[in-house]
């Protein structure tokens, strides 16, 4: 409960009023208010540049300033920026090193937060040692600004607001907590479903709104993948063959919900469609696979719902293979969305990982080139970049579902490795869904290290 008193009020201010609007993988411009924040470490105060992104206390802190504040501690580091014609601009966190800090090089007039700027937030390339990470950050004046919760996760430290403009950092105290504390504080209240569990044993360590069906957006594609894998196993779909793109799939590809332009009659290898569906969340690829297997999207949806019933996924309902909003034929039109509970999704993932573990050969990839489509994608799952051991599985976003993330991570205890599933449904931003799953995995790492499987 000490954690709850110290850190949960800080976390609450990030989550309870996070607005929809940050695109999952695209750049987004929004209001950012510059100011100075005081970082206190071991009694030493350092004034650093920061931005409130979209609202007060959604603080993004200068990593150069943070480097200055953590100098002399076990978490000291130096931020390096590199820019080349071949690779563009990227940053490196050089741990255990110190460098010149430029946090106070340019002061701000009267510390005025009201001088708002429109700034771009995106998944900038940030190398932590040799590992490339993809955190949502702000870039300004050769400096990178990172969300405070992400800072706590990256550097494994605690933090506490002393007042609106003052934050105390505890570099020698690891970020530990219990999910029940997050729930009690209200930190999880914006979510429509949260869960962490062991896919190998079926044990659920924690769930919040776990049995309540909710919109699941493109995490739907996990059920589509299962039916694709079963069709290949039965010989209904040649894994080494190609699929002729229909006019329906092509229309999706050229719509606002399209990812990869595909033309009617175009021949696309099955494996490229699967990779595009799972990594780039290609809606047109899911539709093409569904039509090839069952002859039509409607017939495939019938199979999806029957399979959910067979697996005992109570409350699950599918309208299409890709997770997009769907409209019925009634004159009383409204958006229908595929739904499932967090527990149901956990059971689905458990079944897939047991019977078709090769899914992680796809979903663990950071990048994939699809030559026939002339398309290269980065994995839409940020934890594949940011959290060691993560092997998948799927992201999803619609207005109704919010930002969804279903993750798998391998955890090893005494030479025994289990796949641990983390689920976050209904987040209000892409940043938030990743943060919650990382916090859940921090908890799972400690739990299994202490208790074993």
Image (cartoon, rainbow, N blue to C red):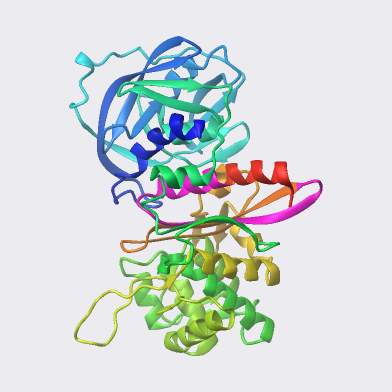
User: Could one spot residue 401 in this view of the protein?
Assistant: yes
Q: Is residue 425 magenta?
A: yes
Residue 327 location, x and y as percent? Answer: 29, 79
Q: Residue at x 59, y 42 (%)?
A: 442
Q: Is residue 246 above or below residue 141?
A: below
Residue 171 location, x and y as percent? Answer: 55, 22
Depth order, front residue of 373/72: 72
Single out the residue that lies furthest toward the top: 44
**122 with respect to 181 (left or right):** left
Depth order, front residue of 96/252: 96
Q: Is residue 328 above or below residue 390?
A: below
Residue 341 location, x and y as percent? Answer: 47, 67
Q: Is residue 127 magenta?
A: no
Q: Residue at x 58, y 70 (%)?
A: 348
Residue 384 location, x and y as percent? Answer: 57, 49
Q: Is residue 158 above or below residue 195?
A: above
The magenta span reads 413-440
Single out the residue that lies furthest toward the right: 415
Could you tell me how many numbered marks the image carries? 0
Depth order, front residue of 197/37: 197
Residue 131, located in which quarter of the rendered image? top right
Q: Residue at x 50, y 30 (%)?
A: 2
Q: Residue at x 28, y 74 (%)?
A: 335
User: Could one spot residue 238 in this view of the protein?
Assistant: no
Depth order, front residue of 319/63: 319
């Amino acid at each position: 409960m000490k954690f709850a008193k110290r850190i949960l009020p800080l976390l609450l201010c990030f989550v309870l009023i996070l607005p929809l609007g940050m695109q999952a993988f695209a750049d987004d411009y929004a209001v950012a208010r510059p100011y100075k924040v005081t970082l206190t470490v071991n009694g030493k105060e350092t004034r650093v540049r920061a931005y409130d992104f979209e609202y007060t206390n959604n603080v993004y802190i200068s990593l150069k300033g943070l480097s200055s504040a953590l100098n002399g501690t076990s978490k000291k580091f130096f931020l390096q920026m590199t820019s080349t014609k071949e690779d563009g601009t990227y940053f490196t966190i050089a741990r255990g090193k110190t460098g010149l800090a430029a946090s106070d090089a340019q002061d701000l007039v009267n510390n005025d937060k009201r001088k708002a700027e429109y700034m771009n937030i995106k998944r900038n390339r940030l190398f932590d040692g040799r590992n490339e990470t993809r955190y949502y950050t702000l870039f300004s004046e050769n400096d990178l600004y990172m969300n405070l919760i992400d800072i706590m996760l990256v550097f494994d430290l605690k933090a506490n607001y002393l007042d609106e403009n003052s934050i105390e950092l505890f570099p020698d105290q690891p970020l530990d907590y219990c999910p029940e504390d997050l729930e009690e504080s209200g930190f999880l209240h914006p979510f429509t479903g949260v869960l962490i569990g062991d896919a190998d044993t079926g044990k659920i360590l924690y769930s919040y709104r776990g049995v309540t069906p909710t919109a699941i957006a493109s995490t739907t594609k996990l059920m589509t993948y299962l039916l694709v894998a079963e069709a290949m196993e039965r010989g209904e779909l040649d894994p080494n063959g190609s699929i002729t793109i229909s006019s329906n799939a092509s229309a999706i590809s050229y719509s606002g919900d399209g990812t990869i332009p595909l033309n009617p009659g175009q021949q696309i290898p099955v494996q490229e469609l699967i990779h595009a569906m799972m990594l780039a969340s290609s809606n047109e690829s899911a539709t093409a696979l569904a039509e090839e297997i069952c002859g039509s999207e409607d017939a495939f949806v019938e199979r999806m719902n029957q399979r959910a019933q067979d697996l005992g996924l109570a409350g699950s309902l599918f309208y299409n293979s890709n997770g997009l909003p769907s409209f019925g034929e009634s004159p009383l039109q409204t958006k229908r969305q595929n739904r499932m509970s967090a527990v149901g999704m956990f059971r689905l993932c458990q079944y897939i990982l047991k019977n078709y573990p090769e899914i992680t050969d796809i979903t663990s990839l950071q990048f994939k080139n699809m030559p026939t489509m002339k398309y290269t994608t980065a994995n839409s799952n940020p934890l594949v970049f940011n959290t060691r051991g993560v092997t998948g599985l799927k992201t999803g976003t619609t207005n109704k579902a919010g930002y969804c993330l279903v993750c798998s991570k391998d955890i090893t205890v005494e030479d025994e490795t289990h796949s641990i599933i983390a689920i976050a449904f209904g987040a209000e931003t892409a940043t938030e869904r990743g943060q919650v799953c990382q916090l859940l995995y921090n908890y799972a790492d400690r739990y299994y290290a202490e208790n074993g499987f």
